[in-house]
Image: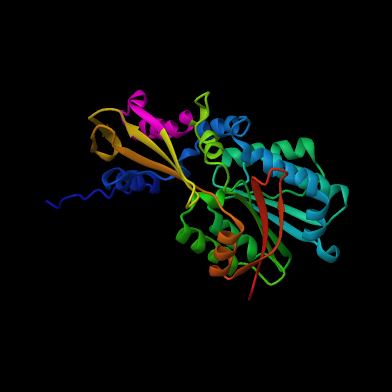
């Protein structure tokens, strides 16, 4: 009798959880924070007084919207605004309203991996700024960006806001920027938000708020594994922990096991052992200064052609173009 072989294919999430929790030291990718519950928690984080990043970038957009619009619509030419990881679009809407006010010819193409997020954004834009031609694209950044780049020769403005570039290690950021640069024409721009180095306590407070919302966001990753992979993480037995190195500008988030424990992940048929105070690294948040951003651009085939900052100099939007 021929033996039947069942080919069970793991999703990328399952593969990454298996690898991350069997590596030493343990780690999980921050991209998995963002299920529907995670999206909602992050919306709360963005309104926290300690989480200065959103407010600083919003201030830049409010105060510099005219100059930014003029730069995007150079010589009055039409453009498509492609936003990587669009979220709720709160900041971007400031620019979109200005584009409409200036009667600019543009198309807005938000990219996000979350269908739920894109649905919410499209609905809110229809209600708030119905004049905007919005064409959302669900998918990973580069799959979607490549498709949009191949559409036609219209000038592209690629936006990557909220210091999302800071979620990548230096070598990963270079690879990311090189991939973007490869899809840019000479006339295109990359508009990128970067959190700047500052008082270390200010940074730590931003990722460890007194109300515990950031802790809930970090632990939601374990909750998601419980729900989607039949795991038995006890969230109360893990501690949210944030560290910041002011020399390198690197902030890191961890989940720390409070005791020796075993966690079983049913879907993976995997038991994970934790020693007391063993960590799971979940997120990196890199902070920059002008020198480090200039090096990053140069190593990626890009150059800084303009920049905008807030009143406190906590945050900066850099404008980059390809040197090809």
Q: Residue at x 54, y 49 (%)?
A: 287
> Where does the C terminus fall, quadrant-wise?
bottom right
Q: Is residue 122 visible?
A: no
Residue 254 in which image quadrant: top left
**Compared to 30, does 264 lie above or below?**
above
Q: Residue furthest left?
A: 1
Q: What type of secondary structure mainly makes up the magenta span?
A: helix
Q: Is residue 246 visible?
A: yes
Residue 105 in which image quadrant: bottom right
Q: Is residue 239 left or right of residue 170?
A: left
Q: Position of residue 40 (x, y in %)?
A: 56, 31
Q: Is residue 286 left or right of residue 62?
A: left
- The residue closer to the viewer here, 144 or 250, is 250
Numbered range of the magenta stretch: 215-240
- The residue closer to the viewer here, 111 or 256, is 256
**Compared to 202, does 322 lie above or below?**
below
Q: What's the image's color scheme?
A: rainbow
Q: Residue at x 54, y 59 (%)?
A: 142
């Amino acid at each position: 009798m021929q033996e039947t072989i069942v080919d069970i294919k793991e999703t990328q999430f399952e593969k990454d959880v298996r690898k991350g929790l069997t590596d030493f030291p343990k780690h999980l990718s921050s991209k998995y924070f963002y299920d529907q519950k995670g999206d909602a928690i992050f919306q709360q984080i963005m309104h926290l007084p300690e989480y200065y990043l959103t407010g600083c970038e919003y201030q830049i957009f409010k105060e510099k919207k005219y100059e930014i619009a003029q730069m995007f619509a150079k010589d009055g030419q039409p453009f498509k605004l492609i936003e990587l990881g669009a979220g709720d679009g709160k900041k971007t809407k400031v620019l979109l309203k200005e584009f409409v006010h200036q009667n600019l010819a543009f198309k807005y193409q938000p990219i996000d991996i979350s269908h739920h997020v894109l649905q919410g954004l499209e609905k809110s834009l229809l209600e708030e700024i119905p004049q905007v031609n919005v064409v959302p694209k669900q998918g990973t950044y580069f799959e979607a960006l490549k498709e949009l780049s191949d559409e036609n020769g219209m000038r592209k403005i690629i936006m990557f806001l909220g210091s999302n570039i800071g979620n990548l290690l230096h070598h990963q950021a270079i690879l990311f920027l090189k991939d973007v640069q490869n899809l840019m024409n000479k006339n295109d721009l990359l508009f990128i938000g970067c959190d700047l180095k500052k008082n270390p306590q200010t940074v730590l407070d931003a990722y460890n708020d007194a109300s515990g919302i950031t802790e809930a966001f970090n632990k939601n990753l374990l909750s998601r594994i419980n729900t989607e992979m039949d795991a038995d993480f006890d969230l109360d037995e893990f501690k949210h922990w944030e560290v910041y190195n002011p020399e390198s500008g690197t902030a890191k988030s961890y989940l720390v096991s409070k005791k020796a424990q075993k966690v079983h992940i049913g879907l993976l048929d995997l038991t994970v052992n934790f020693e007391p105070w063993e960590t799971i690294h979940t997120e990196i948040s890199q902070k920059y200064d002008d020198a480090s951003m200039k090096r990053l651009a140069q190593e990626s085939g890009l150059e800084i052609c303009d920049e905008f900052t807030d009143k406190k100099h906590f945050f900066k939007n850099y404008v980059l173009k390809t040197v090809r």
